[in-house]
Image (spheres, rainbow, N blue to C red):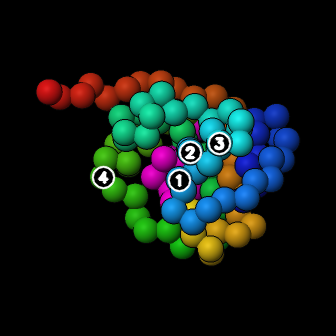
Amino acid sequence: ITFITPQNELEHVMAKEGTNLLDLAHANDIDLEGACEGSLACSTCHVILEQEHFDRLEEPSDEENDMLDLAFGLTETSRLGCQIKVTKSMDGMKVRIPSATRNVQQAKLK
């Protein structure tokens, strides 16, 4: 998988199946924020996928779509990195990290 940083630098990484893109980025010192630590309560791990790979994924959940609505620079192929688990079909995939994030966390109900 190749991460494309906001500065257009390419970061090629090896990934194990089942790892999510947020954890993969963090394990490889790639600057992808994850303010809620993958609990689906923010949009700071927003990534932009290539159409080909976006189309292969399951539809995002309602909760993910709610958080994506808060993301900076939302596109038609935007997803949250914490919700994308690596599969073999993602070999060669490019993942663009947007130039900014918007940290609007959803209040957790207790």
Tell me which numbered mark, 3 or 4, is placed earlier along the sequence: 3
Which element carries disc 1, helix, strand or loop? Answer: loop
Residue that appears at 71% across and 38% down? 30
Residue located farthest toward the left when viewing the structure as drawn? 110
Q: Which residue is mark 3?
A: 27
Residue drawn where x is 83% and y is 41% of the image: 8
Quarter of the figure that contains the N terminus: bottom right
Q: Residues within 10 Å of mark 3 (few under 14, many from 20)?
A: few
Q: Quadrant of residue 59?
A: bottom left
The answer to which quarter of the image holds residue 38 is top left
Name the front one of labels 1 and 3: 3
CA gap between label 1 and label 3 equals: 11 Å
For disc 4, the neighbor class at 10 Å (few under 14, some 14 to 19, many from 20) is few
Tell me whether circle 3 and circle 4 mark residues in contact (CB < 8 Å): no
* 25 sits to left or right of 104: right
As measured in the structure, the alpha-carbon distance from the residue carrying label 3 to the one carrying label 2 is 6 Å
* Residue 42 versus residue 58 in the image, above or below: above
SS at circle 4 = helix
Whole-Å distance between the Cαs marked 4 and 1? Answer: 19 Å
